[in-house]
Image (cartoon, rainbow, N blue to C red):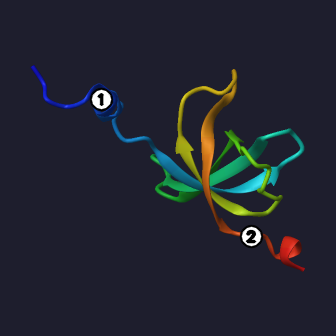
Amino acid sequence: MSTVPQAEAGAATRGNPRKIVGTVTSNAMDKTVVVTVIRRVRDRRFHKFVSRRVKYKAHDEHNTCGVGDTVELIECRPYSRTKRWRVLRTIEKSKEALS
């Protein structure tokens, strides 16, 4: 029998959620932002570096993110059919929002 409380045991079995950094490209929806994540991978055939771009829909509880902000996302439970990420923190505000 384990001596770990029930709440802690459930959290320990979920593993480590992934974290990614990207740029907000849209905030038109309520409590949702679209974040574009660009990563550079090496082409298997030609051995050149190529940019790969993926768009994620993320939950933004307080509608604080603006277009152009750099944010960190964390993997979480499904909020809807397409939302499986949550905004963890804003790393940098966009230059246009500051001026």
Percent x, y for residue 47? 46, 56
* Above or below: residue 19 compared with residue 85: below
Looking at the rendered image, the disc whose residue lies closer to the viewer, 1 or 2, is: 1
Q: Quadrant of residue 33?
A: top right
Which residue is at the front of the view, 33 or 41? 33
Tag on residue 93?
A: 2
Q: Residue furthest bottom?
A: 99
- 61 lies above or below 25: above
Residue in view at x 13 percent, y 25 percent? 2
**Residue 14, position in %: x, y?**
36, 31
Identify the residue at image location x=69%, y=40%. 59
Q: CA distance from mark 1 to mark 2?
A: 35 Å
Q: Is residue 1 above or below residue 16?
A: above
36 and 80: which one is in front?
80
- Snapshot quadrant of residue 15: top left
- Local SS, label 1: helix
Residue drawn 83% across the image and 58% down it: 67
Decide which of 37, 68 is in the foreground and name it. 68
Residue occupied by mark 1: 13
Residue 96 rendering spot, x and y as whole percentages: 88, 73
Amino acid beneath label 1: Thr
- Label 1: few (<14), some or many (≥20) within 10 Å? few
Mark sitting earlier along the chain (1/2): 1
Closer to the camera in the image, 23 or 16: 16
Q: Residue at x 29, y 25 (%)?
A: 6
Instruction: Report helix, strand or loop for mark 2.
Output: loop
Given contact means CB atoms under 8 Å apart, are the residues at marks 1 and 2 in contact? no
Residue 9 position (above or below residue 69): above
Would residue 9 appear left or right of 72 to someone viewing this image?
left
Question: Split into 4 quadrants, where in the image is the N terminus?
Answer: top left
**Left or right of residue 42: residue 80:** right
- Type of the residue with mark 2: Lys
